């Protein structure tokens, strides 16, 4: 399974690293997609660095089976770029698994792909989603069809568990 991880500067270290490592350990290929291929970006805690494998202009949704959106400052930075927003929107329109934690749903808001989904997020993002008309609940993890969401770093274990289950439901590529 090929997973695109959209990542920008000041991502939440643990919300990127722990799912990234867990998905790879489970045998999935994870590519970091960002604004500039080859760029090195750092997490907001300064504990984790990542190198962008491919830029948004170099990829298509069809190249991947699922999407990971870590939180922290990354989603806010990425939502200012139409190519990042379009990439996320295409995953939702294709009903491919979208795995978003903490501030990750900011990209769903920007892509106008939050309606008709039950979800959760970081508490301030929950407020934004509610004001926009989303069906928001305050739970450690929420699974609604192709969308898996969690609130914060303390929810990572549940987020990984449910994300792996969602990935198991995706038919194998031919």
Image (tube, grey):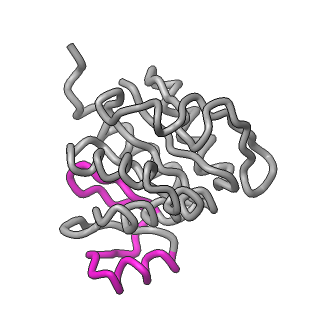
Residue 133 placement: quadrant = bottom left
Query: From what the image shows, is residue 32 above or below residue 79?
Result: above
Magenta residues, as a range?
A: 123-150
Q: Relative to the observer, which residue lies in front, 47 or 161?
A: 47
Furthest residue in direction bottom, as rendered: 131
User: Looking at the picture, how far across and down is residue 5, in whole percent?
Assistant: 50, 40
Q: How many marks?
A: 0
**Where's residue 87, x and y in %?**
38, 46
Quarter of the image that includes the C terminus: top left
Residue at horizontal 21 percent and vertical 45 percent from the top: 95
Q: Which one is in front, 64 or 168? A: 64
Q: State yes or no: residue 142 in magenta.
A: yes
Q: Nearer the viewer, residue 109 or 117?
A: 109
Q: Is residue 150 left or right of residue 92?
A: right
Residue at the image point whose x is 23% and y is 65% from the top? 117
Name the image quarter holding the N terminus.
top left
Residue farthest to the right, as pictured? 46
User: Residue 6: within the magenta?
Assistant: no
Q: Is residue 137 left or right of residue 4?
A: left
Across and down, in percent, residue 38 comes to: 67, 30
Measured as percent of width and height from the top left, residue 114 is found at 29, 66
Q: Residue at x 35, y 37 (%)?
A: 66
Looking at the image, is 83 positioned above or below residue 152? above
Give the residue at x 44% y 24%.
Answer: 28
């Amino acid at each position: 399974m090929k997973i695109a991880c959209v990542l920008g500067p000041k991502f939440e270290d643990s919300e990127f690293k722990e799912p990234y490592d867990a998905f790879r350990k489970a045998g999935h290929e994870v590519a970091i997609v960002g604004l500039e291929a080859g760029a090195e970006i750092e997490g907001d805690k300064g504990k984790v660095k990542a190198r962008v494998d491919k830029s948004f202009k170099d990829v298509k949704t069809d190249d991947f089976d699922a999407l990971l959106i870590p939180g922290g400052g990354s989603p806010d930075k990425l939502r200012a770029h139409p190519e990042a927003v379009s990439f996320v929107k295409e995953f939702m329109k294709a009903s491919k698994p979208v795995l978003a934690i903490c501030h990750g749903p900011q990209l769903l808001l920007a892509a106008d792909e939050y309606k008709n989904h039950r979800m959760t997020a970081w508490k301030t993002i929950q407020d934004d989603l509610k004001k926009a008309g989303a069906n928001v609940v305050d739970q450690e993890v929420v699974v609604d069809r192709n969308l898996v969401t969690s609130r914060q770093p303390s929810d990572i274990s549940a987020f990984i568990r449910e994300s792996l289950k969602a990935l198991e439901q995706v038919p194998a590529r031919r």
